[in-house]
Image (cartoon, rainbow, N blue to C red):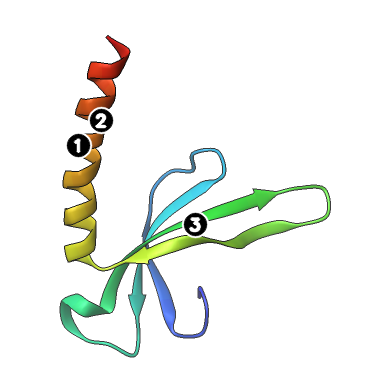
Amino acid sequence: MAGQHFVLEWEHPVHQALRVRIMRDLRKHGVFAYALDVREYVMGEHFEGFTRRGIRLQREQVMWLRNALNEALAHWDTILV
């Protein structure tokens, strides 16, 4: 269990220090119970686990972010050409 109120529903394969997961909040119901959680994960000599660096977004926020990222990437591509 991730925190005392959250349950891991899905996790994307690991990419470097980022973990991308869908978490379910046991205190909520319906679509608002789920959130995308993007968090830093450290594997070091003296510590392994999640840091406080991260963000948890509801579905509507993820959809907005996806559109913003698509626009940013399109602009990025024009800069690099």
Image height of 7 relative to 63, above or below: below
Which of the two discs, 2 and 3, sits closer to the camera?
2
- Residue at label 1? 70
63 relative position to 28: left or right:
left
- Residue at label 2? 73
Image position, residue 23 (x, y; %)? 36, 69
What's under tag 1, amino acid-wise?
Answer: Asn
Q: CA distance from mark 2 to mark 1?
A: 5 Å
User: Could you tell me which residue is drawn at 17 percent across and 64 percent down?
Assistant: 60
- Residue at label 3? 39
Q: Residues within 10 Å of mark 2 (few under 14, many from 20)?
A: few
Residue 8 placement: quadrant: bottom left
What's under tag 3, amino acid-wise?
Answer: Arg
Q: Residues within 10 Å of mark 3 (few under 14, many from 20)?
A: some
User: Could you tell me which residue is drawn at 25 percent across and 41 percent down?
Assistant: 69
Split into 4 quadrants, where in the image is the C terminus? top left
Image position, residue 34 (x, y; %)? 27, 72
Q: Residues within 10 Å of mark 1 (few under 14, many from 20)?
A: few
